[in-house]
Amino acid sequence: MSPETHLTTILLLLLLILDSPATTAAGKFREAPAFRNGKNCSNSTIHIALTLDYSSPYLRGSIAAVLSVLQHATCPENMFFHFLAIHHHFNNLNKTITTSFPYLNYNLYHFNPTLVRHLISSSIRRALDQPLNYARIYLANLLSIAVNRIIYLDSDLIVVDDVAKLWNIELEGRVLGAPEYCHANFTYYFTHKFWLHPTFSNTFENRMPCYFNTGVMVIDLQKWRNDGYTYKLEHWMRVQKRYRIYELGSLPPFLLVFAGNVKQVEHKWNQHGLGGDNLEGQCRDLHPGPVSLLHWSGKGKPWLRLDSKKPCPLDSLWAPYDLFRQEALFSDS
């Protein structure tokens, strides 16, 4: 090998190493400001759970979601974040979190994909089939029994209100609270095979099921543990593997178990669907009424549309929370 070829090979290897996610993820996010409590804050803790997917662009969304929560909180130092992630990414994720939020109170939990991989059926979008998309089912198992209540948030949203208002809702004996949408066509979420099978369709007997989006939920973890809701959700995933009763990933099992028994939360806490549908991801407008949380559920994600220079109008509301460090193509220095 000639000296020139050897040098070229070394340079290419260095570029690959320097450009790998393991070495640059922390440096790709800017540091957020330090947010401090107001004068009248108590010592109570608000627990919030998100997934951190180090191997996908959803990490960028999670970082933006955390920043939005802190920025709008009256008592940001009372926030404690519980992050679910795949174990072999822990070191890189810790670097990313401490670089962007050096003051953040958090724990990182290992979510083992083998818990759920054998239960996952293919759906209409590959992103919906990733094991971390099902991690919310196992929150009660992974978190300490000292944590009795949690707010679960998806990675494709921002909070534009004090999340303490959501935390303080009364569940009135229910296991979870979420905005419900009773005008939605509920039959859409299950296949004809489901509705034609009396054992399956009778699941909703004596219930008035309404659609709810699982990207924003307040969960009573103690009730969840006591009544074995992880097992109940897994049961329907096993039924799905055998009979193919739905097409939409992790949402239908939640509807099967909880719909008709959800504590109604104001719609402003999940202005969902901003990512359009699951196939094309067209631009959408806000629903009428006040807004406390913007949710880009659907195929279109704001960071992808902004990077492609083809943003939807509402993507500009997400952009201020984006800590991703855009690399300049050319240096002016």
Image (spheres, helix red, strand yellow):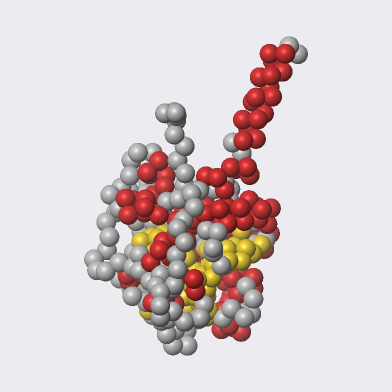
The single residue placed furthest to the top in the displayed view is: 2
For the view shown, which residue lies furthest in the left direction?
288
In percent of width and height, residue 283 lies at: 30, 50
Looking at the picture, tell me which residue is in the foreground, 98 or 228: 98
Residue 244 x/y as whole percent: 54, 60
Point out the image quarter for the N terminus: top right
Q: In the figure, is residue 325 to the left or right of 111?
A: left
Where is residue 190, by image quadrant?
Answer: bottom left
Q: Residue at x 50, y 48 (%)?
A: 29
Q: Nearer the viewer, residue 116 or 155?
A: 155
Q: Is residue 332 left or right of residue 231?
A: left
Q: Is residue 227 above or below residue 198?
A: below
Q: Nearer the viewer, residue 190 or 5?
A: 5
Q: Is residue 60 visible?
A: no
Residue 293 location (% of width, % of height): 36, 65
**In this picture, is 284 found above or below 70?**
above
Can residue 11 be seen in the rendering of this structure? yes
- Residue at the spot 64% in from the left edge and 25% down from the top edge: 12
Residue in the picture at 58% in, 42% down: 24
Extreme bottom residue here? Answer: 173
> In the displayed structure, would residue 1 be above or below residue 55?
above
Question: Which image quadrant is residue 81 in?
Answer: bottom right
Q: Residue 204: x, y in percent? A: 45, 78
Residue at the limit of the structure toward the right, as seen here: 1
Query: Which quadrant is the C terminus positioned in?
Result: top left
Q: Which residue is rendered at x = 56% and y = 56% of the image? A: 97
Total marks drawn? Answer: 0
